[in-house]
Image (spheres, helix red, strand yellow):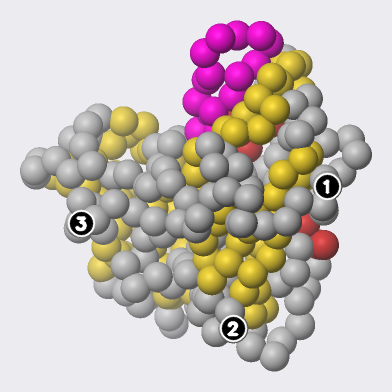
Amino acid sequence: MKKLIFTLCFISASALMMQVSAQSCGSNGSGACQVTGGPSGGGFQAPNTVPCAEQGVAYSSAMQFAMFSSFNFLGQQDVDSLEFISIENLPCGICWAVNQTDKRYSSNEDGCINLSGTTTDAAGQYKLAISVKAWINGQANGQTIPASLFDQTGVRLYLRVKSNGGTCVAVDTAANSSANLNATQGGCATAINELSSSVSSLSIVPNPMNSEAVFSFMAEKNADYTVRITDVTGKEVSVKQVEGRTGENRVAVERNNLPAGVYFLLLTDGKNVVTKRFSVTD
C-alpha cells in the first residue's frame, strides 16, 4: 500500500483546546424518529439498508437499533444501559438525534437515530465514530468509552453519500474495518465537523500539494495523537502515531508517489477528531 511519510516537529505557541462538540445537533426525544425495532440479536440495522444521502438534496432517515445486552471489549461485558455522547465523522451538514431525550437506552431496548440535513460532501461511504457512556456489569457509575475504543467492540456504522442523480453503491466494510475513525469526512468550509470555535490554526500548506506540505494544529496539552490519511472512498492510505506538545504542532507530509486526487487528513486524540481536506496534484 502506498504511504505518506510523516515527520513531527514542535513550535511553542499559545495553547488552544481541540474539542468536538459532544452534543447532537438535532432535537432528541420521541419526535426525532419512529422506532420500528432493531435486529433481533441486538445492534444496528445493516449498513446497506440505510438509504444514501444525495449531494445537495435534503435528507432524513431513521437508523434502527436494539441496544446490546453485552459486547466484547477487554472480555465479555454485560450491558445495563448505554448513553450516546457523540456521533462524529458524519458528512458535513448532516445532524443526528435519538428518540430518547437523555440519549440513554437499557439493555435490549429498541431505539432509533435520525440522520438529517443537506450535505455537499464527496460521494462515498462515511464510517461514523461513536462515543458512549456505558453502565456495565452492574456497576453504579457509567464509563465513558471514546470513539477510538468503542470501535474495538466491533460496532460499524456507515452513512453513504451519492452524487446528485447518481447510484448508491454498497458499503465496503473490508475497506476500513481495521481502522478507527476512518471516514471520508471533509468539505466543511472550516474543514472541521462539529468542532469548537476555540480551535484555530488548522491548516495544510500548500494545498493542493505536489511533493510535500506541512499540516499544523494547536494542542492544549501534551498528548498522543493519531494522524490518518484516507482517500475519498474512506480507504486508509497512511496512519501514524505522533506525540503532540502544548502549542503549535507541525507535521511534514510527503507525497511519496501518492496518486493525484482528493484526500482527507484525520487527527484524533482518542476522544475528539478534526479533519482537513486536501488535494495532491501532478
**Residue type, numbered disc 1:** Gly
Q: Residue furthest bottom?
A: 165
Q: Return the residue nearer the eye: 272 or 246.
A: 272
Task: Give the mark count.
Answer: 3
Residue at 39 percent across and 56 percent down: it is 194
Can you identify the residue that label 3 sits on?
200
Identify the magenta region: 129-146
Q: Residue furthest front?
A: 30
Can you identify the residue that label 1 sits on?
37
Q: Is residue 5 magenta?
A: no
Quarter occupied by the C terminus: bottom left
Q: Which numbered mark, 2 or 3, is in the foreground of this view?
A: 2
Q: Which SS type dominates the magenta stretch? A: strand
Q: Position of residue 86 (x, y in %)?
A: 50, 44
**Residue type, numbered disc 3:** Ser
Query: Relative to residue 195, is residue 222 drawn left or right?
Result: left
For the residues marked 3 and 1, what is the alpha-carbon distance in whole angstroms? 42 Å
Is any part of residue 16 visible from this angle? yes
Query: Relative to residue 107, is residue 203 drawn left or right?
Result: left
- The picture quadrant where one finds residue 172 is bottom right
Q: Is residue 30 above or below residue 69?
A: below
Label 1: state its secondary structure.
loop
Can you identify the residue that label 2 sits on?
57
Label 3: state its secondary structure.
loop
Q: Position of residue 17 (x, y in %)?
A: 23, 42
Q: Return the residue nearer the eye: 216 or 202.
A: 202
Q: Which mark is first along the chain, 2 or 1? A: 1
Q: Is residue 232 above or below residue 85?
A: below
Which label number is shown at residue 166? none
Q: Residue furthest right?
A: 40
